[in-house]
Image (cartoon, coloured by chain):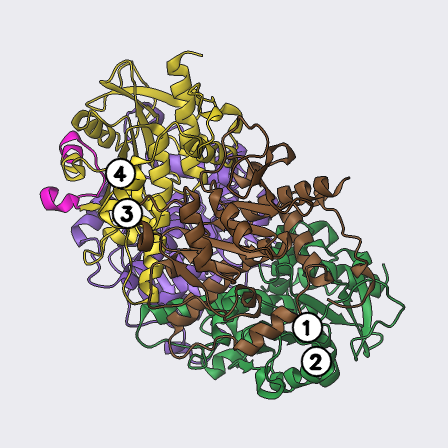
Chain colours: A brown, B yellow, C purple, D green
Amino acid sequence: MSNLDTLVQDLVIANRILAREEVADAYGHVSVRDPDNPNRFLISRSLAPELVGPDDIVALDLDGQPVRDERRSLYLERFIHAAIFAARPDVMAVVHAHAEDTLPFGVTPATKLRPVIHLGSFIGHEVSVWDIADRFGDTSLLVTNMAQANDLAQCLAGNRVALMRGHGFVAATPSLIEAVRVSVYLPRNARALMRARQLGGEVRYLSHGEIEAHNRGYSPHSAATWRAWEYWANRAGCGHLLTRPDSGHGESPKG
Amino acid sequence: MSNLDTLVQDLVIANRILAREEVADAYGHVSVRDPDNPNRFLISRSLAPELVGPDDIVALDLDGQPVRDERRSLYLERFIHAAIFAARPDVMAVVHAHAEDTLPFGVTPATKLRPVIHLGSFIGHEVSVWDIADRFGDTSLLVTNMAQANDLAQCLAGNRVALMRGHGFVAATPSLIEAVRVSVYLPRNARALMRARQLGGEVRYLSHGEIEAHNRGYSPHSAATWRAWEYWANRAGCGHLLTRPDSGHGESPKG
Amino acid sequence: MSNLDTLVQDLVIANRILAREEVADAYGHVSVRDPDNPNRFLISRSLAPELVGPDDIVALDLDGQPVRDERRSLYLERFIHAAIFAARPDVMAVVHAHAEDTLPFGVTPATKLRPVIHLGSFIGHEVSVWDIADRFGDTSLLVTNMAQANDLAQCLAGNRVALMRGHGFVAATPSLIEAVRVSVYLPRNARALMRARQLGGEVRYLSHGEIEAHNRGYSPHSAATWRAWEYWANRAGCGHLLTRPDSGHGESPKG
Amino acid sequence: MSNLDTLVQDLVIANRILAREEVADAYGHVSVRDPDNPNRFLISRSLAPELVGPDDIVALDLDGQPVRDERRSLYLERFIHAAIFAARPDVMAVVHAHAEDTLPFGVTPATKLRPVIHLGSFIGHEVSVWDIADRFGDTSLLVTNMAQANDLAQCLAGNRVALMRGHGFVAATPSLIEAVRVSVYLPRNARALMRARQLGGEVRYLSHGEIEAHNRGYSPHSAATWRAWEYWANRAGCGHLLTRPDSGHGESPKG
C-alpha cells in the first residue's frame, strides 16, 4: 500500500473510533494533513463518521475547497480544519465534535476545564473557550466560512484543544493517533472533574510540571500508544484495517 | 413505491430510531400526517416502537378514531396526536415519549428547559410545562380523551416542544425527520443544561438571535439533515429501508 | 403447555428481563407463587438471572426449603421470598435485587424515595427503608434466615416496595408482570428524582390522588401492559418464549 | 489441563471481564502469583485486556523482569504488581486500572471513599489515596520503576485497595476471583456514594462490624462467588473457557 493509501485507511479507522467512543454522532469530523502536500488535507465527504469508508475521503485545500472536482456534499464546517492547518504548521490532524460531556464547560464561564487525570494531560494546562458571538454576533453557532474559522484558530493559538461555546470542541495535534486520543480522553477528564466538583471540597488538578512530564513521555509510536489504537480499532469493528507501523517498537520492553 | 408507502416506511424508520436512541422504550409513539388527506394521520397500533413494521401502521382521524375497521389495540394516548394535528395545520409529525432526561425539568418549576447547545435550538426559546392537574385534577397523568389532549395542544401553542409534568414531552414539527431530530436532541440539551448547572456559576444560554439563526439555516432536505437520518437509521438496524429523497441535495457542496 | 409450564417459562423471561434492564447482575432473584399450591413458590437455583433456563427453576416452601430433593445450590437469600409469600396472601410475585440507582435512597435517611413520574406510581406513596441493623446488629447485610426475612416482610407491610439499607430493594406484587414492571421503573423514578433535586427548587411529586388513579387504571392483562412485557422480552432475546395470554385484550381499542 | 494452564486460562477470563465491565479500557492490567513459584507472577504482555489470549501471558519476577527471554513489549507499570507481590505474601492477585468512577475520589481530599453497600465491604473500612508527588515530585503520574511501586505498596499497607491520585486504583487480594470482584464493585460503591452525597443529608456508611461480618462470610469457593464469576465470564464472551473448581460447592444449599 502507498503511504497515502495507509493514511486514508487510518483516517477511516479514526472516523470509526470517534463514532464508537461516542465522541461523534451524526456530526463531528476528523482530518489529517497530506504529508507529501502540506497545503492539502484529507477528510470525509458529508457523512456520519460511523459510515465512512475509503471512497468517502476527499482532499481539500487550505481554503476548505476540494482539490478535485467533487459533486458530493462536503461538511459545512470543513473550514475549521482548513484554518487550523493553515495557522499551525506543527498540526497534522484535527478533530471537531460535540462530545456530550465537554458541552457543560463551554457554557459555564466560572469553571475551567483542566486536567485532573493523567490521561487528561494531553489537553494541556487549560482549555480556552471560543465564543463565536464575540466577533460575529448572533449566528447559528456553526463555523461556515474562513473568517469564523480563522478566529477560532486564533483562540486555539498554540494549544491542543479549545472548546466552542454552546457547540463542541476542536483538537489539533501532531499526529492522527493523538487527535483521536485527545478526543477520547477529553470527555473522560471532563466527567472526572464534574464528579469531583460534586463531591465538594478542594479539587487537586495536575500540576504544570506533571502535565509537562506526562506529555514529554508520550510518543505516537510507543507500544502504549499502539495498544490504545489497536484496542479502539477492534472495538470499532475495524481491527482488520490496522497497519502496524514498522517502527520496531514491538521489540523493546517499554509500555 | 407510492408516496404513501414511502411515508409508511419512513414512519417505521422513525419508530426504530426513537427506540434505539432511547427516546422511547415500551412507551412513546410517533405519527405523521397524511399529506394527501390532511384530516388523517398515520401511527402504529399499540406496539413498542422497536417492534413496529409497515403492517402495524394504522390511519386515524382527528378525533383519534381509526378510519378503517380495526380490531387491534390502539395507543391509549393517541388523542395527543389527533389534537395537535387538529390545532396546528403547520405540523406534519408528532412525537410523544418519556425520554428520561426530560423528566426532571417537568417536575422542577424553578428551572426552565432552554437551549444551551446549538442542536438544542430546535426546541425553541423556552419550553412550557403542561400540568394535567391544572384543569383535570387527580388523574393517572395519561392523556386519554380529546378534552385533555386539546388542553395540552393549547399549552403547546405555536411551539415545537412542551413538557408534560411527571410524564414526558410532546414534539410537533413540520416534517417527520424534524420530529425525530428534536426528540433526540431535546434530552441531550437537557443533560448539557443539568450538568452545566451542577458545575455552578452563570449558565450561558443561546440568545434569541442565535436560536432564530440556527433554525433559519435548517432545512429538512439538506445534506446535513440527511446525514443524521441516515446515521440514525443505520444505528437502528434499518439502513436498508432508507429512501433517498430526490431533492438533488447530494450535489451541492453544503452541509 | 400446562399452566405450570407456562409459569416456569414466564419466570425464565422475567429473569432475563431483569438482567437485560440492569435490575439484576450476578445477584438478584425473582420468584412466583404456585397458583395451584399457594404454600409453594418457584425460583431459580443459585444462578445469575441472565443465565436462567426452565431446568433451573425449583419449588420452595414458605420456609424457603426445597419441596423436592435438591442437590444444587440455592440462593442464600431465598428466605426473603418465603417470608413475603407467607405474610402476604395477595402477593403472587417477588423480586429482590440491587438496582444501582435505588441504592442512594437506602443510605440517605433525609430523602424519601417517592413517585415523581407516572410510571413511578406503581411503587406507592412512599417507600420504607428497612435497616437490618435495627434488630440484628452488625451483620453481613444479607438476609440469611427466616427471622431476618420476617422482619423485612413486616417493614414492607402492605406496600409494594421496600428499600433495604446498604443493600437493595424488594418488590411484592399481585402478578409476575407487575413485579418486573415495578423493578424496572423503580430505578427510573429514582433517577428522575435525583436529577430533579440536583436542578434545585421545589420538586413536584405525584399527589396521592394521582398515584391512586394511575394504579386503579392498571391491569396486568391490558394491551399497554402486554406491550411492555413483549418489548422487554424481545430486548432480552427471549421474544420466542412469549405465550400470549388468551384474555382477548388484543381486540379492544385501549392502551 | 495442568494447574498452570488453568491459571493462565483464568487470567485470560479475568482480563476479558475487566474490559467488559469497564474497569479497564486500553489500559489497566491484572496479574496472578504463580502458586508453585511464589517469586513469579503471570500477567499479559502489553495489550488491551479485551484482546488478551493465553499466548499473551508472560511470567515476571518480583523486580518486574521477564523470567524468560521476551521480545514483546511489556506493561510500563508492571512494577506495581511486582512490588505488591513482594511486600504482601498473602496477596495472590493484583489489579491496576483507571475505572472512571473511582477517579473523583482520588482528587478530592475532603471526601473519603468508604463502603455504603454490602458489595462495597470488600474494599475495607477506608481506602487510602496514594499521591506519587509526595515523594517523587512532578512525574507523569505513571509508576515506572520499583522505587515508585514500593512506595505505593507501602501506602496500600495491609489493605485490599488504594486509590492513586489523578490516575486510578490498585486492588490486592488473596485470589484472582476476588481481585476481579473488588475491581467491579469498587466503582459501583463509588457511584452509590457520589449519588447519596448529592441527595444531601447524612450518609449511612457500613459499620466496621458490618464490613467485618460481610468479609468473614465471603469465600472465593462459595456458590455465590462462582455465580458472579460465571455471569461475568459469560457477559465477556468467554463462558466456554470456564473451569469449574472441584470444590464440591455445587452440592450444598448455600448461596
Q: Return the residue nearer the eye: C209 or D32.
A: D32
- The Cα atoms of the two marked residues, 4 and 1, are separated by 51 Å
Classify mark 3: helix, strand or loop.
loop
Q: Are marks 2 and 1 in contact (CB under 8 Å)?
A: yes
Residue visible at 41% across and 65% down in the picture: C103
Sort mark 4 into few (<14), some (14-19) or many (20+) by Cα contacts within 10 Å.
Answer: many
Residues at marks 4 and 2, CA–CA distance in whole angstroms: 57 Å
Q: Are marks 4 and 3 on the same chain?
A: no
Segment tinted magenta in the rendering: B130-150
| Residue type (three-letter) at the residue carrying disc 2 | Ile
Q: Earlier in the sequence, mark 2 or mark 1?
A: 2
Q: Residues within 10 Å of mark 2 (few under 14, many from 20)?
A: many
Q: Can residue B188 be spotted in the picture?
A: yes
Question: In the figure, residue D162 lies in which quadrant?
Answer: bottom right
Q: Pointer 3: what residue?
A: A138
* Mark 2 lies on residue: D84
Q: Quadrant of the C terminus of chain A?
A: bottom right
Q: Nearer the viewer, mark 4 or mark 1?
A: 4
Residue D58 position within the rendered picture, expressed as x and y whole percent measured from the top left: 81, 65
User: Do callouts 4 and 2 mark residues in contact (Cβ within 8 Å)?
Assistant: no
Which label number is shown at residue D94?
1
Mark in front: 4 vs 3: 3
Q: Nearer the viewer, mark 1 or mark 3?
A: 3
The disc at residue B170 is 4
